[in-house]
Image: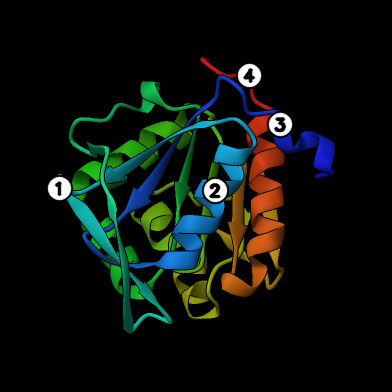
């Protein structure tokens, strides 16, 4: 996670989830920028074409961002890594979208890395890929994680076999360092 690792994602394709509304802006922007600055090609994935309206502190409307590809159009084979930001409303919309859930399920089951923060683990739970894994999330999800067979821990960042999770926007620096490092450890174009 040193600065020298910050250029290790050349040739890596990363998909980042964006809900139609309710994705926490800093949890979308900072990880997107971190992997992009490290050399990754980043595609914004959404439920529908157009733009996704982000929020600050779950309630304050913020900027909108363009969706590059819908989940229905995307394939797990298209991405070397995925990022799922939080935001309570956005994460709830993502976990309710069958295509978003299926893309994440196939991606994780294929052994590819993913970075998931805050309320984003709801989508992991819906994808049924947390059993026997250790992860963290926004604290209110700990019962959900345990009920899905995962072990929840209260740490700023947790990496478990390619799955990087963090709790809140306060953990973004550690989260961004960890996803860049973890994504760089996997050869692009698997």
Identity of the residue drawn at 56% across and 19% down: 11
Q: Nearer the viewer, mark 2 or mark 4?
A: 2
Instruction: Answer with left or right where residue 178 lies relative to residue 118.
Output: right
Position in image of residue 190 (x %, y %): 52, 15
Instruction: Answer with left or right where residue 20 lies relative to residue 13.
Output: left
Instruction: Answer with left or right where residue 30 lies relative to residue 126.
Output: right
Q: Circle 2 sits on which residue? A: 33
Q: Circle 3 sits on which residue? A: 7
Is residue 163 shown above or below 7? Answer: below
Q: Nearer the viewer, mark 4 or mark 1?
A: 1
Q: Circle 1 sits on which residue? A: 48
Q: Could you tell me which secondary element the residue under label 4 belongs to?
A: loop
Q: Earlier in the sequence, mark 4 or mark 3?
A: 3
Is residue 127 among what the camera can see? no
| Front one among 139 and 176 | 176
**Dot 2: few (<14), some (14–19), or many (≥20) neighbours within 10 Å?**
some
Instruction: Answer with left or right where residue 118 lies relative to residue 55.
Output: right
Position in image of residue 101 (x %, y %): 30, 46
Identify the colour scheme used: rainbow
Residue 187 numbered mark, or none: 4
């Amino acid at each position: 996670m040193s600065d020298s690792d910050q250029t290790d994602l050349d040739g890596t394709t990363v998909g980042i989830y964006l809900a139609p509304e309710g994705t926490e802006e800093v949890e979308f922007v900072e990880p997107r920028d971190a992997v992009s600055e490290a050399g990754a090609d980043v595609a914004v994935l959404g439920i529908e074409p157009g733009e996704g309206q982000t929020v600050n502190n779950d309630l304050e409307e913020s900027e909108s961002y363009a969706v590059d590809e819908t989940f229905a159009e995307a394939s797990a084979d298209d991405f070397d890594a995925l990022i799922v930001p939080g935001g309570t409303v956005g994460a709830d919309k993502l976990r309710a979208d069958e295509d978003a859930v299926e893309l994440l399920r196939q991606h994780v089951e294929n052994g590819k890395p993913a970075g998931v923060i805050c309320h984003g683990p709801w989508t992991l739970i819906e994808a049924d890929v947390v059993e026997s894994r250790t992860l963290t999330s926004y604290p209110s999800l700990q019962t959900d994680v345990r009920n899905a067979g995962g072990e929840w821990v209260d740490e700023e960042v947790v990496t478990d076999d390619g799955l990087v999770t963090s709790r809140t926007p306060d953990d973004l620096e550690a989260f961004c360092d960890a996803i860049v490092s973890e994504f760089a450890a996997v050869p692009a174009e698997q």
